[in-house]
Amino acid sequence: MPQLSKRTETFTDSVIRRMTRVSLQYGAVNLSQGFPDFDPPKEILDRLAEVTKEDYHQYSITWGAQNFREALAEKQSRRMGRTIDPNGEIVVTCGSTEAMMAAMMTVTNPGDKVVVFSPFYENYGADAVLSGAEPIYVPLYPPEFNFREDELEAAFRQHPKALILCNPSNPCGKVFTLAELQLIADFAEKYDVFVITDEVYEHIVYEPNQHVYFASLPGMWERTISCSSLSKTYSITGWRLGYIIAPAPIIEVAKKVHDFLTVGAAAPLQEAAVTGLRFGNDYYRWLQEKYTSKRNLFLKGLDDLRIPHTIPQGAYYVLLDISEFGYDSDLEFCEVLARDVGVGAVPGSSFFREPVNHLIRLHFAKKDETLTEALNRLESLRRKILPR
Ligand code: GLN
């Protein structure tokens, strides 16, 4: 038999998605893969029911339905503080997963380097492999997950083509400050580098932290490819609706990459999601309050159980420190946790370039009763998992 592609030799399956399967197998409360167990807004679901009876069953325009792009441009223009052209500056994709992949294929050639902060969302590694780019990792140091300026500049000195910026950050919950973003912007300008953002948690930010769109920094619009999605904002991760916003010459190319990758996002779902894109600011305030209350509930529960953890500034993940259990493999710990305690988590090692095995990631995008059930189960943690 001929060999399969070299390109795929280095990747395993996604650990995040694997942990969802492990959770299902053991009937664990699944706090591994980050998706909600509560309903999307009713208005969006009502519109979806109507859409099934309307004429939205064939392909939309490949780079996104007109109605969707117009609603998105209006919302993001408001948020990002610049007028975004729905016809020239947006490509609608199948989730931000495709947006990031298409962005990488749009700006990098095989052999190009890309700067990635570590810890990082695991897809970026695979995106680099698939596009033939080589990551240069820059560590973020706990507890605040700050980077060191000299280490970042050392990465820029290696002439990367792009930097990937996940803000708010999965899995560490960092929200980059304006000063940090400005420093990245200065380097991007000085070394002439693109910035590809992943801003899917743009609306999940805890006071007093504030989300700043990288593209909105002075001079950065021209070199920023902003990727995001509707998944987290409207609790519709299964709809796979994402997008790229960038200057027209970049979007021209991204449109072609996207067209040949997937043709387009689901037409009926785009139409139904327009209802969400047209929500007023109240909705985003409500979402922020909802997640703030979930964060408080969950972190307090962990504190009551004396489990050391990170304090997220944004997004909906917490890293728990499991050093006291003395496991060499955090993957094995997560399997035992799912099987014996009944809580699904993601091993921290799948996010770090560095050899980290003492952290596991849980998320709190769940109904309060689900979180309470998980906390109740975690009460037995030290009885059921003995230190090694
Ligand atoms: N972004 C979510 C997470 O980190 C979901 C990832 C996925 O499976 N697409 O868990």
Image (cartoon, rainbow, N blue to C red):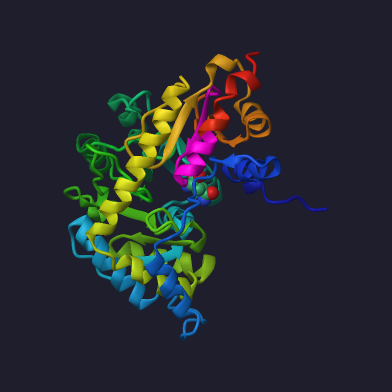
Against 90, residue 287 (above or below) is above
Q: Write the residue at 63% across / 35% down.
A: 342
Between residue 339 and residue 377, name the one nearer to us.
Answer: 377
The range drawn in magenta is 356-374
x and y, in percent, of residue 306 in the image? 46, 19
* Residue at 49% over, 61% down: 240
Q: Position of residue 280 (x, y in %)?
A: 24, 63
Q: Is residue 256 visible?
A: yes
Foreground residue among 189 and 88: 88
Furthest toward the right, the residue is 1
Q: Is residue 74 above or below residue 292?
A: below
Residue 127 seen: no
Q: Which residue sits at x=40%, y=27%? A: 310
Spot occupied by residue 215 in the image (x, y as percentages of width and height): 25, 52
**Residue 242 in magenta stretch:** no
**Relative to 119, 157 lies left or right:** left
Q: Is residue 95 left or right of residue 13?
A: left
> Which quarter of the picture shows residue 169?
top left
Percent x, y of residue 166 = 37, 43
Badge count? 0
Quadrant, the C terminus: top right
Q: Is residue 372 magenta?
A: yes
The answer to which of 206 and 350 lies nearer the viewer is: 206
Asked if 209 appears above or below 267 in the picture, the reply is above
Q: Is residue 18 above or below residue 228?
A: above
